[in-house]
Image (cartoon, helix red, strand yellow):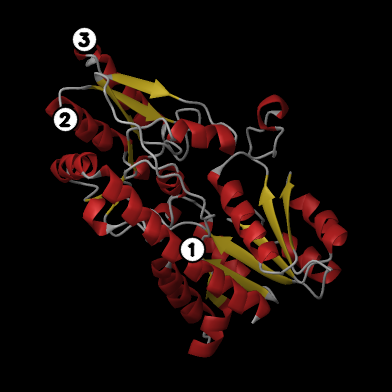
Amino acid sequence: MTQTLFILKRRPDFNAEVHAHVGLSTGLYNSASFMNNMLNDMGIASALEVAIDNNCIDRLITRHRPRYVILEALWVVPEKFAVLCRLHPNVTWIVRLHSEMPFMAGEGMAMDWIGEYSQIPRMIIACNAPRMLRETRFYLGHLNQWTQEQTEQQVIYLPNYYPQQYRTQRIGNNKDTIDISCFGAVRPLKNHLLQAIAATEFAESIGKKLHFHVNAGRIEMQGGPVINNLKGYFQHLWDRGHRLINHTWTPREEFLELCGRMDLGMQVSLSETFNIVGADLISQGVPLIGTAGEIPWAVPMFCADPTNSADMVQKLQLSWQFADINVAQNQAALTAYTTETRQIWHKYFKG
């Protein structure tokens, strides 16, 4: 019998020609697949399924007969559990949140649904970040008048995992351009525009033309003005040789290959819980400038203030000068973080 079953919702813009390889090509799918593989590697029988909508859940549970169903992110309407709990009385439900509260504030139904989830039998809320864990425990503990012990049992910490498969060899940059990526879905809290300005200043400081790489194929949470501003910014810098380069979302293997072609990676976001894109860059041996206090495994020496472009430029210069140290230290920190993740998941599901 399967111990755990991860269920994700298929992306709303699903296109069979583009997404047939998994049916859902996002960081959320990659995150769940990493953890699914991790559990199986530890001897905990686990499976992963992608559902079209709420109505697929019963069929998927019947197929796998899991003890735990882990629903990744907020997509199952609370009313659905009245039926599901009756059909599957032995299942423990875990709704796993992937956002910090500033990002969650953009999900209009989040607090309502989380509150309703907390009153469903055999339902557990999991957070993948310590601050979100604290805040969710405060909210639901007071809402339901739970004791501290009940609160800790009902709201748990299940951090992200990332496979420890790294490249270290880097090729020197002898060209007159520099490739700097700011990958990830385009949305306001990803902070693309300020990073583009900092990247331009840095490129000019070392006498190179900037190629600024983004994933403009995914616009989320009112991200339209962000991409429009990026386009407008680079249009006016065309004569100076700076370019905005848009990439569509690709299967993971192709994306890692793209990451490996970058000279530097930027993820100086305003809100993060783990940042798989940053881990992808580091895994390919690309120096990363992260966000101070937001990416939990990123080395602080190479992190910048997300509201301070001068600090970003300074950290780009530092990472350019000490690229090997940036990669080595971030890979070591990511390894330590994911090793702890394995221990936390193992203790909860097999301990």
Check disc 1 and report the residue beneath it: 338
Give the farthest residue toward the top: 239
Q: What x and y, as percent, mark residue 74?
A: 59, 55
Query: Within 10 Å of the Cα at label 2, are there few (<14), some (14-19), or many (20+) other Cα atoms?
Result: some
The answer for how far apart the CA atoms under marks 1 and 2 are is 34 Å
Check disc 2 and report the residue beneath it: 201
Q: Residue at x 22, y 45 (%)?
A: 322
Q: What x and y, as percent, mark residue 83?
A: 80, 64
Q: Nearer the viewer, residue 214 or 346?
A: 346
Which secondary structure, mark 3? helix
Check disc 3 and report the residue beneath it: 239
The answer for how far apart the CA atoms under marks 2 and 3 are is 15 Å
Residue type indicated by callout 3: Asp
* 3 and 1 marks in contact (CB < 8 Å): no
Instruction: Point out the frontmost of discs 1 and 2.
Output: 1
Residue 306 against residue 351 in the figure, above or below: above
What is the quadrant of the N terminus in the image? bottom right
Which is more N-terminal, label 1 or label 3? Answer: 3
Q: Residue at x 56, y 52 (%)?
A: 31
Instruction: Point out the frontmost of discs 3 and 1.
Output: 1
Residue 92 in view, yes or no? yes
Which is more N-terminal, label 2 or label 1? Answer: 2
Which is more N-terminal, label 3 or label 2? Answer: 2
